[in-house]
Image (tube, rainbow, N blue to C red):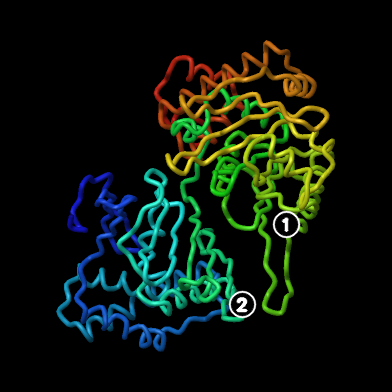
Amino acid sequence: MATDEILKKYDSYQLDANGLVVGVDISDRGDFVPIYTVNFPELGEATRTLLLSLRQELLAVVPIDTRRVEDEDYIKELSVKYRDASNLMIDRYLPGTSDKSKSILIAYILNTMLGLGDLEPLLADDNLEEIAVNDSRSPVWVFHKKYAWCKTNITLHSESVIYDTVEQIGRRVGRGITNLAPLMDAELPDGSRVNATLFPISQKGNTITIRKFAENPWTMPALISNGTVSTELAALIWLCIQNEISLLISGGTASGKTSFLNAMSIFMPANHRIVSVDETTVMKMPNFLRWVPMLTRQPNPEGKGVVTLYDLMINALRQRPDIMLIGEIRVQKDAETLFEAIHTGHAVYGTVHADNAEDTIVRMTNPPIDIPKIMLNSLGAVISLFRHRRLGIRRVLEFGEMLSVGDVTVINRWDMRTDTFIQLNALSRLVDTISLYGGYTRPEIKADIADKTKILNWMVKNKVLDVERSGAVVANYYKDNEKIMKLANDDTPFSNDLIWGL
């Protein structure tokens, strides 16, 4: 079978990569995985060669101040200057070029000068979670939210091209990568995380792995809509957050822990002060929330200026937060500070690597975290996430209630055979805690969860899935719960006019 023969087309859409409009086709071409094809505008080989030669000339005309490459306004100013200079050079070297062709050529130049070249369309695709360059002989791979891992038609054709791309990323954030220091962690201006390695540490060649920052983050209604969590369980989590009960989210790599933490943010009251500490910019909350994001910092080449997660957690406690969000607990000091925050009256929500609820307890009470088991009783519950690689789905695997002795009882569990969430046990200590601090009776707790379930179902039905609108619905509920309940009970079609603050 010819390699370009399409057995089945799964999807097709267009992307705008900084002015360069490209088409994307995802199809079955007889390989073991879907093929993600980027259809670039056609450029002749002579034109491509000319564009590459213009790079040095542009740098001479508009030099880059490396001290300001992290300044967003400077990059915008630089982009305008490059656009104007490119326009003049195209008129000089390619007279008679049409306006349409000129805009394509300028977009190519800008993506090469200020972006990551042929990787820019992949960065522009919000459907992608990961971009992986394995070496110069293999195609670039991407992880698609719907189709999982796909092979692309893009190849970075030499190890030097990969190295130049990594260096360009590193320069923007003050990171270096050399044969003596062949590993690099960095961050793109949009918050996407980058890991890079050099040959011979990575034996097949230089690598780049980009974990993309989601411009449109997951919300709880969106996770309900795609089957990640049940509406009833989401309503219970909402009740916990409303009553400032601390929760720990666990799961394996890329199971969606941080995405779930972000999705929970729509339940946080607008009159609370939220401080988040993390290693990268991965959170995005409703604009009306009082949120102070704080990031760690790696040492400079002289080994100075490092700011650790522990440093940020200690500092955050001095900012009088109502809610603290912790990107990931890795060592004992992180965990001890987390529980100190809980014991001093803060609601804390964090993540940790562990496969299920029981394994979370084992992980927390053994090295390298290694805290006394009894400390875990200050948590309300553990939420464990699972990524099924073969099916390309993520699910809340278990919701476990913490007991006073530091053990966990699994209340809800995902059943893979039926793709449903099954209740294994009744709530016990969590109900007592909500009753003690929230003043609810057991029947009132049950009724409140039912009300919240109805509101969430109404939001899903009306496709209120984005962070601003879904957050605004919850904020309106805190302000006037009877009004929001009436909208849900009457099944009123959603409109921004119905919700205050939109």
In the structure shown, which secondary structural element does the residue marked by tag 1 occupy?
Answer: helix
Q: Residue at x 52, y 81 (%)?
A: 65
For this view, does 175 lie left or right of residue 206? right
Q: Nearer the viewer, residue 37 or 390?
A: 390
Count of labels in the image: 2
Q: Is 128 above or below relative to 401?
A: below
Rendered image quadrant of residue 184: bottom right
- For the residue marked with disc 1, what is the amino acid? Leu
In the structure shown, which secondary structural element does the residue marked by tag 2 occupy?
Answer: loop
**Label 1 to label 2, Cα distance in Å?**
23 Å
Tell me the crowding category of disc 2: few under 14, some 14 to 19, or many 20 or more residues within 10 angstroms, Cα based: few
Pinpoint residue 181: horizontal percent, then vertical percent. Answer: 61, 77
Q: Nearer the viewer, residue 376 or 326?
A: 376
For this view, does 437 lie left or right of residue 249? right
Q: Determine which residue is flagged by label 1.
A: 309
Q: Residue furthest left?
A: 96
Q: Residue at x 58, y 26 (%)?
A: 233
Q: Residue at x 68, y 61 (%)?
A: 296
Camera sees residue 269: no
Task: Say which label, 1 or 2, has the lower sequence index.
Answer: 2
Camera sees residue 5: yes
Q: Determine which residue is flagged by label 2.
A: 181
- For the residue marked with disc 2, what is the amino acid? Ala
Q: Nearer the viewer, residue 315 or 3?
A: 3
Pinpoint residue 45: horizontal percent, then vertical percent. Answer: 21, 78
Tell me the mark number nearer the camera, choosing from 1 and 2: 2
